[in-house]
Structures are given as C-alpha cells and as structure tokens.
Amino acid sequence: MTPRTPTAAAVQVSGAPAFRVRSLVLTDFRTYARLKLDLDGAGGLVVLTGPNGSGKTNVLEALSYLGPGRGLRAARVVEPTRWGAEPAAPGMRPAWAVAATVDGPAGARHLGTGLDPDPTAPERRLIHVDGASARAQGRLAGACAVQWLTPPMERLFQDGAAGRRKFIDRVAYGLDAQHAGRVQAYEQTVRERARLLAFEPAQRDRAWIETLEAQLAESGVAIACARTDAAGRLDAACRDSRGPFPGARVAMTGAVEDWLAEMPALAAEDRLRRALVAARERDALIGGAGAGPHKSDLAVVHAPKDQPAEACSTGEQKALLIALVLGAADLIREAQGARPILLLDEVAAHLDRVRREALFASLLDSGTQAWLAGADREPFAALRGTARFFAVADGAMEPLP
C-alpha cells in the first residue's frame, strides 16, 4: 500500500472526512524543550516508537490537550511544564504550551493552549482558537475532536466509576460543545459548596449555599442528560460486533438518571436540589456532595456473551474498549462531520495478531488520523509503507524511512 496524500481541509480516505493535525509545536512540555513537527502530506496513521521513557506518551498527551478536559493523564494544569524550564519573561512563571494547525470540515484551524504564565493568576489553562482568546474549553470541542486509549484505561471496567464517567464525558464533548464547560463549572460549584458547609451551621452563608445548590441542580441534570444521550447513541453504535471486537450494550446508571427516566428535567432538577438541601449536614462531614451526576456510573455489557464488562476476561475487556473507542469515533463523525483524532498508546503491543490487524484495517478504511505509540516497531510491521514512522528519544523525534 502507498501513503495517501491529503488534498483538502477535511482529509478524506475511503470517503470519510477526519480531523487531522497538520503541524504541531510543543514548548517546555514534559521532556520537550521545543518540538516542531510538520505533518503536511502525511498519511492517516502516525507511529511513534522508542524505548520506555523516551517521550512517546508525552506527545500523545500534548495532542490530547487539543480537546477539552485535563488531557489523557488527567494532570493538574501545572504538571506538564518541563522540569528546569525558564520563564518566557522576567517575573513570569515557567509555562508549557501546545500549538497545532488542525484540518477539519471548516478548513484549517489554528489552536493553542498552555499554562497561564502570569504568577498572580490562578493556575489555569489558556486557550486560543484562530488567534483569539477563548474563555471556555468548549471552543476546542467545536474545532477539534480527540479520543484516546492508554494502558491505565485497561482497568476501566475494574476500577471506580470516576474513570468511566470521564470516558463518557469525552464522548459527550464531541457531541455537545457546552458539556465541557458544564462539567468544569459543576465540579467547581461542588467544591465551593463543600467549603461553605465546613463552617459551623450558625456561621454559614445560607443564601449563597442555596444559590449554589440551585446551580448544582440545574447543571447536574444537564450533565446527566448529556451523558445519557451520549451513552444511548454509543449503545446504538456498538450493538454489532466489528470483526474480533465484540458488540456492547452501554447505559448510564444512577439516581439522577433514574429520575430523568421518570419525570421531566425540571422536576428532576427540583428533586436534586431538595436532596442536596436535605443532605447538608452529612455532606459537611464527608466534604463533598452525596447526590448528583458525580455519583453516576457507565454500565457496559459484552453483548455476544450477555456478560457485564467487569466479569469478562482481560482480553475481552481490551477488545470491548477498542469497540467503544471505534464506536465513539463513529458518533463524533456523525455529529461534527469528521472523525476524531485517535491516540492509541501501547495498544498494538497488547493485542494478538488477529485483533491488531483488524484494528489497523479499521483505522485505514475509516480514514482516521491515529497516533500509535509503542516501544518496538515489530507490532507495526503491517503498516510499513502506509503509516508515517518516527523514532522518539531524548526529547526529539526523527522520521524513519
């Protein structure tokens, strides 16, 4: 097979448009003091190989910041700053930055994000879209879509519900540009309410607590609605098996979701607000909120076996995860008119030959730009002549023949 050359803003392979990174610049990001990649003319698949610790995952993490959220490592915003980085100007804090030109249905978009270097400002992530500052991360969701699969996610069905909520949130980001802002605001409001409840009852600002609880009820129900919609659409997209990747049944579970199934959204808001009021003293003890969408979960069932994902074998769970990621990519293509960028870290090495070749074939047939990282080149042998290969070492990337 020969590499296909992109010729339009929404690059197409097999008739499927896809978001595609054309250029990437990292500044003081993790192990990279400065990295500049020009991918114009590259095929849909990009393979990064190199020893463990060479910086492959750091590149994938940088790409994950082209979408809303905290990136594939869920790091604090200051953490990606390179150790030993110097501030750009006297009196400023050292700060990481990621800039990219991304082709998509609307043409080339110029995206930039990074840590605010102002030491007097809160630790926050700055965002620029086409040269203009953007206050909300939702602006990124409208300009680029990114999904990923990393080794820690192999325990998605075994660990707590937080990881599964993050997974469905990433799907929802691609379907509803406002979802990222709602989630961020909701989490901040939960923390603010907990801070106020830490005071003795007589010292609390009851009026402000009531305002926060009304905000939590409104945004909480909106978040639950978006997740339920995303899970329902993902369920439909994943019902049928994809070769060795099994079909799946997907649904959100939780009290707020149950209320929404029984009553209108406004009634569910009122019920959540009343639940928060009734739980103030208990919540004061636990330092959080005992009711809300942050207590919900994503239930996944291996459809051919009619078996909950957490009861499946390790190999079956990996195959289910890939099926969910491919299904999410289909949904985002329908919603945004282009397939998301996929970041697949050490996925190929953890699959048997049949599943690995099926994954490669699916990516090539769909026209997805996928970045695949692994320690060795051998698992990617089937992609020689089709993918673009880079060797990663010592904070640098070099193209391979």
Image (cartoon, grey):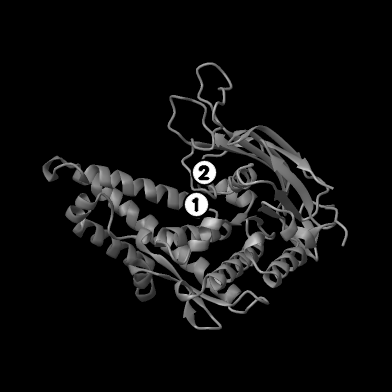
Q: Position of residue 85 (x, y in %)?
A: 57, 26
Horizontal side, residue 17 vs residue 195: left or right: right
Assign a secondary structure to mark 1: helix
Assign a secondary structure to mark 2: loop
Mark 1 closeness class: few <14, some 14–19, many ≥20 residues within 10 Å: many
Q: What residue occupies the far right of the structure in this picture?
A: 2
Residue found 43% across the figure and 32% down from its top: 122
* Total marks placed: 2
Distance, label 1 to label 2, CA atoms, is 8 Å
Residue 401 position (above or below residue 89): below
Residue 301 position (above or below residue 44): below
Residue marked by disc 1: 180
Asked whether 401 or 124 is in front, the reply is 401
The answer to whether one can see residue 346 in this image is yes
Q: Position of residue 251 (x, y in %)?
A: 46, 72
Residue 305 position (above or below residue 374): below
Residue marked by disc 2: 136
Are the two marked residues, 1 and 2, in contact with CB atoms closer than 8 angstroms?
yes
Residue found 28% across the figure and 65% down from its top: 271
Residue 60 got which mark?
none
- The amino acid marked with disc number 1 is Ala
Asked whether 263 or 364 is in front, the reply is 364
Q: Quadrant of the N terminus?
A: bottom right
- Which of the 4 image quadrants contains residue 385? bottom right
Horizontal side, residue 263 vs residue 204: left or right: right
Residue found 19% across the figure and 46% down from its top: 206
Identify the mark nearer the N-term, 1 or 2: 2
